Image (tube, rainbow, N blue to C red):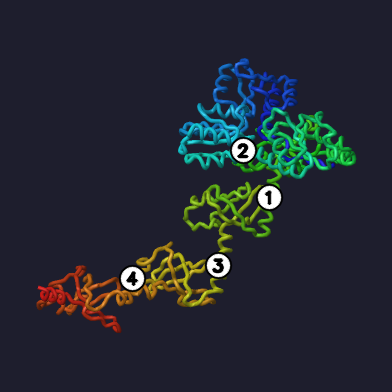
Amino acid sequence: MSVRVAKSAGFCFGVSRAVELVQSSAAAGKRTVTLGPIIHNRHVVEAFHQAGVGVIDSPEEANPGDTVIIRSHGVGREVYARLEARGAEIVDATCPFVKRIHGLVSRAEEEGRLPIIIGTPTHPEVEGIAGWCTACKIFDSADSLKKWVTEERIAADLPICMVCQTTSTENLWKLCRNFAKKQFTNLKIFDTICKATEDRQTEAALLSRQSQAMVVVGDAKSSNTGRLAMICREYCDRVALVDDASELEPAFFAGITDVGITAGASTPAWIIKEVNKTMSEITNVEAVQEENFAELLEQSIKTLNTGDKVIGTVTGIGNTEIQVDLGTKHAGYIPYDEVSNDPSVKPEDILHVGDQIEVFVVRVNDQEGTVQLSKKKLDGLKVWDEMADYVENKTTIDAVITEENKGGLVANVKGVRVFIPASQSGVAKGGDMAAMVGKPVQLKITEVNRARRRAIGSIRAVNAESRKAAQEKIWSEIEVGKKYHGVVKSLTSYGAFVDIGGVDGMVHVSELSWNRIKTPADVVKVGDEIDVYVISFDPEKHKISLGYKTAEMNPWNQFMTNYAVGDVVDAKVVKLMTFGAFAEILPGVDGLIHISQIADRRINKPEDVLSEGQQVKVKITDVDAENKRISLSIRALLEDGEDAE
């Protein structure tokens, strides 16, 4: 018979943490009691009783000086006050996921929202959540939620915050959530089903579909164990809920060749192993058991030495360390400060129960049967191997600039401080290197010194490589007339140099504007993005001549498009001559007002009537397109006015 045990079976993070806190308190010799059974499993509670840990049902039963452990289900806000009034030391083992829900309902009430809790009203977790708000509604089904809305005629715009018991089923939560979304217009929903619970239920459903029989291990009082049994019964006809191996009935497995085992979050691993072993004995699979026993025996006598690299499986995540099964007689653990080189990383974010990890043996204690491990040290060794590979292979890597110092910049590459000299930073001399801090960059590791734990990098090398590739692309595709979008890099008296994507081209001052300009700065400045086109190029000398002014920008073309003989326009007198005055119609286009056309009377000289800079209205009387000459008249406008009178 095939027996498969669900990977997610057994203690969840919250339960494991609570049990560990009780063990630590009892081991420290403190007078320890738990507020209610620490978990819903009589075997664990009895074991703690034997160790001198008591159980109280209310805060008033606590004595001054008692260490009272609040179980993972959590309690209401006022319970803490009652315990403090009794002079008790409080150790809060509330599951962090449950603690989050306390905050959600508390803040919701402050915002004027009605908290709605989906779960079993009598469950300790739900009672604890309700204790963090003065008023709330609790529903154990979508039907009861609908009934409340209908009978109480609840307004659709009622501000509501909806949360769920962490051990509820996904199906129940989905039904309630979908109804609420359709019913309420001012609704905030928080999916608070514990991920471990969700994974356990999902795996139980999958395993029960694939098995002829299912065994659910756990205390009948455990809510999540009961839900597991309910889920298994949806997909499998033969399901047994047992407290321990003694409740297994051989007749139950008659004719069965495929059995699955799952367990609630409050079921200890040793009970699950005992059930698995007993089932194997019942079904007479001695050969497999003997083989497994031989493997286990071989593993258990394996020796460990400081400096070894070993592979283990994460079995628990405590509040100070990670428990690791190495398959030996030693109990392995990783202190939190040995998990990662990055102090901002939370151990629970990168390690999970069931993960297989490679670790470094720091210290072996054969007397206590423990071994201290480090993931950080092994990762560090691997990182320096990678650094050496980066140098050899000239690999471009991603990094983040973390600081600026006197000589350059410092980047973080997989937890290693990489120094980047100022000359290799890619920042121009005198530039603001501090502006680089916090920015992601690409760099190459150019030097590694393992003994001194030193690495040197270069951003400039990546930029040079990118620029070289861009240059090769441009020179392979360049042709006269091709347009580019570039950036003005520098200005000289005779033109502007423009980067067109890795290659600099020069726009001569005569190609910058159709108007007369004194310097290139009259048209562009460093940093401007402009569109240019290729006038000529020399691949051997690596020179490119660019143009900026276009036919569309030609002022004469603009004049010919927008003006005609007979038009009256505003013009500015720009120059006075003995024979008349030149007036600017638009930048780059001037017309002549002959002295005879300045006034409707005879004048001696133009300055008798006009002055430079004066704005005047003129009439276009003639256009010589071939010679680009324009005749203007003020007199014609005066005569037109007289005729009109």
Other-residue count near label 2 (Cα within 10 Å), few / some / many at <14 / 14–19 / ≥20: some
Q: Nearer the viewer, residue 571 or 437?
A: 571
Give the mark toward the camera: 4 or 2.
Answer: 2
- Residue at 23 percent of width and 73 percent of height: 583
Other-residue count near label 4 (Cα within 10 Å), few / some / many at <14 / 14–19 / ≥20: few
SS class, disc 1: helix
Which label's residue is closer to the chain start, 3 or 2?
Answer: 2
- The x and y percentages for residue 463 are 56, 61
Which label's residue is closer to the chain start, 4 or 2?
Answer: 2
State the separation of the CA atoms marked 1 and 4: 59 Å
SS class, disc 4: loop
State the separation of the CA atoms marked 4 and 2: 78 Å
Task: Pick out the residue farthest to the bottom.
Answer: 626
Q: Nearer the viewer, residue 531 or 68?
A: 68
Q: Are marks 4 and 2 in contact (CB under 8 Å)?
A: no
State the separation of the CA atoms marked 3 and 2: 58 Å
Q: Is residue 255 visible?
A: yes
- Residue placed under numbered mark 4 in the picture: 517
- Residue placed under numbered mark 1 in the picture: 384
State the separation of the CA atoms marked 2 and 1: 51 Å
SS class, disc 2: helix
Q: Nearer the viewer, residue 442 or 262?
A: 262
Which label's residue is closer to the chain start, 4 or 3?
Answer: 3
At label 2, the amino acid type is Leu
- Would residue 130 appear left or right of 242 to someone viewing this image? left
